Amino acid sequence: MRFCNYIFSLVCICISSIAVNAQVPHIKPSRILDAPLMSYAEYENLYEDIDSGKYTNEEIAKFEMSSVYKDLYSPACSWYCGGVIDAVSASSILATTNVFTYNAENAHDFNHESVWAEGVDGNGIGEYIIYIFPATCPRVTGVKILNGYVKNESLWKANNRIKSLKVYYNGEEYAILELEDTRCIQFFEIGTVGYGPHTTDKDPWTLKFEILDVYPGEKYDDTVISELYFDGIDVH
């Protein structure tokens, strides 16, 4: 009888989980942008190299059309001209080595070669990363993700990539992002969250991203995000 009750409870939990996930919108990327073509150092030096006349006009036009350059390394204006993140934290991180760290902040440092990697046994399902925004932060309407260890193709294949992420807004279930298995930047339109810059008497607000499913790596069981950053309104 106890065993039957146990099985019944498990079935109820599974059904409840499926029902909850079905209630929130599932969002696929509205755009698949570019994959990194150069190293972090090369992108960082690109603006100075362009300014010094190192590249032809055709090469410059190609760089300026690249979403990796525009979003991560270009000095051009974006939501981040007014958008602010107070803190980034995670439920776990992979242990630091002599060479690399895997802190949550790495997913929001505008460097495609550094990563957040969860640090629990197994594939990291249920682990999460949280972004805290000041109350007066411009509102967010989009999420951009470089999924997996995108530094190079071999690292990307070796480690887990995220298949789906559950988004929580101020602790409440908000949406599920369905990610493609690609090294390219994926852009998700999530609606409008936040309060806006003219807010008064509000606490900071949060977005939490919880791993629901993964694409398995060929060598490691660590699940990795290279960049998770934002787009939005209220800046201009």
Image (spheres, rainbow, N blue to C red):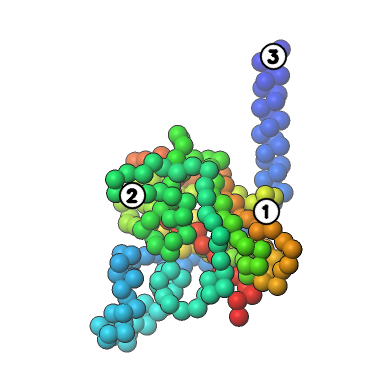
Q: Could you say which is closer to the camera, residue 36 or residue 101?
A: 101
* Amino acid marked by disc 1: Asn
Q: Position of residue 169 (x, y in %)?
A: 66, 54
Q: Which mark is residue 100?
A: 2
Label 1 crowd (10 A; few <14 / some 14-19 / many >=20): some
Between tags 3 and 1, which lies in front?
1
Label 2: which secondary element:
loop
- Extreme residue in the left direction: 54
In the image, what residue occupies the spot 71% across and 68% down? 199
Can residue 181 be seen? no
Can residue 95 be seen? yes
Q: Which residue is mark 3?
A: 2
In the image, what residue occupies the spot 63% across and 55% down? 206
As displayed, is residue 32 above or below residue 6? below
* Amino acid marked by disc 3: Arg
As displayed, is residue 225 above or below residue 18? below
| Total numbered labels | 3
In the image, what residue occupies the spot 54% across and 46% down? 128
As displayed, is residue 154 above or below residue 232? above
Mark 3–mark 1 distance (CA, rounded to whole Å): 38 Å
As displayed, is residue 210 above or below residue 37? above
Is 130 on the left or on the right of 53, as rendered? right
Between tags 2 and 3, which lies in front?
2
Q: Could you say which is closer to the camera, residue 28 or residue 172?
A: 172
Label 3 crowd (10 A; few <14 / some 14-19 / many >=20): few
Q: Quadrant of residue 85?
A: bottom right
Q: Which residue is mark 1?
A: 170
Instruction: Assign the N terminus to one quadrant of the image.
Output: top right
Query: Which comes before the other along the chain, label 3 or label 1?
Result: 3
Mark 1–mark 2 distance (CA, rounded to whole Å): 31 Å
Q: Could you say which is closer to the camera, residue 226 or residue 84?
A: 84
Q: Position of residue 54 (x, y in %)?
A: 25, 83
